[in-house]
Image (tube, grey):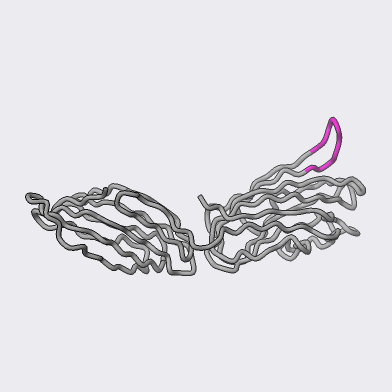
């Protein structure tokens, strides 16, 4: 049950970004002496800016306001962060905070509490490289995406991903370097890490490891590699957040130096990217 006391308590919504939110609040006022209920009253609000909005005012003297339902729907094409709170004489008490993807709704029902209504199926994509892919160019890594290691992310959301990249180098002095790319607006939190085998050995293998928050940027800058035919594994994982629909995601790679087939990403390399729904 969510009650607002006379004159002091109001219901407010904080929108952290430019947005397009449709908000509907239904409530019933009761007399504090007789407890006789009045008719149900809906309040309709549309919010389009990053601001704090009073979505239900405090009841008048001698009344207590019983909030029966709250619906907050994101009708924009980008995600929105919302915080619902009770303002008690200018002191704020937070009820719930949520990130709403496009077409998502946060709902409160008296006697049931809060629940999200996710209207779209969470994205869950697997991609696999179908043939060896050689990369010789040491220029901008943004143009070095092995065929098959990319996909379209149809909606703005938070994503987690895991990639296993099998690869060889043309020389033991030629390092392998990997990165990620999201075509579209990317925002925090974005964090991508890797652990990569430089030289394989049963008892004395060498590895590189690193973390990166920027796309189109080497996660680690290796200066040594696994001489062909030794195939080694780079494990890359991370979390990215897009703010527009139909962005794209890709794994990128390049050799440290230009050499014949300086870096070969092997057939069977794969990634899995999925929408983080909690």
Q: Nearer the viewer, residue 33 or 145?
A: 33
Magenta segment includes 215? no
Residue 63 at x, y percent in the picture: 12, 54
Residue 256 at x, y percent in the picture: 80, 54
Left or right of residue 222: residue 157: left
Residue 245 at x, y percent in the picture: 55, 68
Residue at image x 79%, y 60%?
A: 138
Residue 46 at x, y percent in the picture: 33, 69
Residue extending farthest to the top is: 203
Residue at image x 79%, y 53%?
A: 269
Q: Nearer the viewer, residue 91 or 215?
A: 91
Residue at image x 42%, y 57%?
A: 81
Residue at image x 66%, y 58%?
A: 125
Q: Nearer the viewer, residue 211 or 145?
A: 145
Above or below: residue 243 compared with residue 225: below
Left or right of residue 208: residue 161: left
Magenta segment includes 205? yes
Left or right of residue 106: residue 197: right
Above or below: residue 256 compared with residue 76: above
Q: Main secondary structure of the magenta part?
A: loop
When asked about the image quadrant of residue 11, the answer is bottom left
Over which residues does the magenta segment extend?
Answer: 197-206
Residue extending farthest to the left is: 33
Number of numbered markers: 0
């Amino acid at each position: 049950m969510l009650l607002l006391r006379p004159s002091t308590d109001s219901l407010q919504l904080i929108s952290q970004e430019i947005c397009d939110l449709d908000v509907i609040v239904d409530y019933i006022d009761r007399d504090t002496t007789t407890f006789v209920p009045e008719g149900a009253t809906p309040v309709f609000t549309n919010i389009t800016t990053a601001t704090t909005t009073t979505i239900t005012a405090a009841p008048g003297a001698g009344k207590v306001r019983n909030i029966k339902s709250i619906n907050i729907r994101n009708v924009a094409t980008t995600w929105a962060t919302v915080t619902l709170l009770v303002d008690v004489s200018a002191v704020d008490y937070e009820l719930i905070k949520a990130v709403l993807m496009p077409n998502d709704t946060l709902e409160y029902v008296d006697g049931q509490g809060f629940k999200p209504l996710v209207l779209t199926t969470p994205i869950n994509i697997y991609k696999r490289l179908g043939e060896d892919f050689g990369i010789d160019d040491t220029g901008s890594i943004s143009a070095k995406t092995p065929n098959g290691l990319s996909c379209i992310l149809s909606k703005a959301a938070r994503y987690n991903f895991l990639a296993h990249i099998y690869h060889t180098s043309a020389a033991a002095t030629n390092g392998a370097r990997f990165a990620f790319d999201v075509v579209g607006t990317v925002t925090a939190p974005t964090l991508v890490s890797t652990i990569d085998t430089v030289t394989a050995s049963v008892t004395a293998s060498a590895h590189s490891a690193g973390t990166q928050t920027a796309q189109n940027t080497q996660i680690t800058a290796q200066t040594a590699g696994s001489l062909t035919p030794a195939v080694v594994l780079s494990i890359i994982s991370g979390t990215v957040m897009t703010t527009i629909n139909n962005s794209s995601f890709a794994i990128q790679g390049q050799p440290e130096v230009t050499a014949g087939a300086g870096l070969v990403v092997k057939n069977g390399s794969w990634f899995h990217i999925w929408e983080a729904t909690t």
